[in-house]
Image: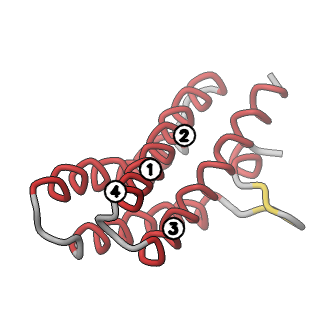
Amino acid sequence: MTWSRLLCRKEGGYMNEEIFKDRTKQLALRVVDFVGKLPPGKTTDIIGRQLLRAGTSVGANYRAACRAKSRPDLISKLGTVEEEADETAYWLEILTDAKLVRASDSAPLLQEANEILAMIVASIKTLRDRS
């Protein structure tokens, strides 16, 4: 089994590398849209920039991981994806908890960030266990 199949294990099967690339790209596009709709203000501008950076970085770093030269390189690059997905979730939680956005508006994006995070964490664990 190739590492790309290990990366995206789902119930009842596997999500291939291209589907996961698309999923992380869609996360980025949704973050771009979400940040563009934030209410104006100094706080939302600052947090929005952080969210935009982290949310768009998930897919970019996943694509870099797909070109890893070795298993240790892959684990390292996936660690960056993990950090960025977790940071994306964090900024969404801050916006919601500070009541700058409604929970109903941020919940779908937060769920997607957390699902991607969970898959990456599981993939890293699998790769480490098989080393």
Name which of mark 3 and mark 4 comes first in the sequence.
3
**Residue 49 image offset from top left, x and y in percent:** 21, 52
Name which of mark 4 and mark 2 comes first in the sequence.
2
Neighbor class of circle 1 (other Cα within 10 Å; few <14, some 14-19, many 20+) is many
Q: CA distance from mark 4 to mark 2?
A: 24 Å
Could you tell me the amino acid type at mark 2?
Glu
Position of 13 with respect to 94 (left or right) is right
Name which of mark 1 and mark 3 comes first in the sequence.
3
- Please tell me whether mark 3 or mark 2 is closer to you in this view: 2
Q: CA distance from mark 1 to mark 3?
A: 11 Å
Name which of mark 1 and mark 4 comes first in the sequence.
1
Q: CA distance from mark 3 to mark 4?
A: 31 Å
Q: CA distance from mark 3 to mark 2?
A: 17 Å
**Residue 9 image offset from top left, x and y in percent:** 78, 55
Question: Nearest the camera: 65 or 104?
Answer: 104
Say if mark 1 contacts mark 4, CB within 8 Å. no
Residue position for label 1: 58
Instruction: Name the residue rendered at 33%, 69% in the picture.
Output: 101
Residue position for label 4: 98
Residue position for label 2: 82
Residue position for label 3: 22
Could you tell me the amino acid type at mark 3?
Asp
User: What quarter of the picture does the C terminus occupy?
Assistant: top right
Say if mark 1 contacts mark 3, CB within 8 Å. no
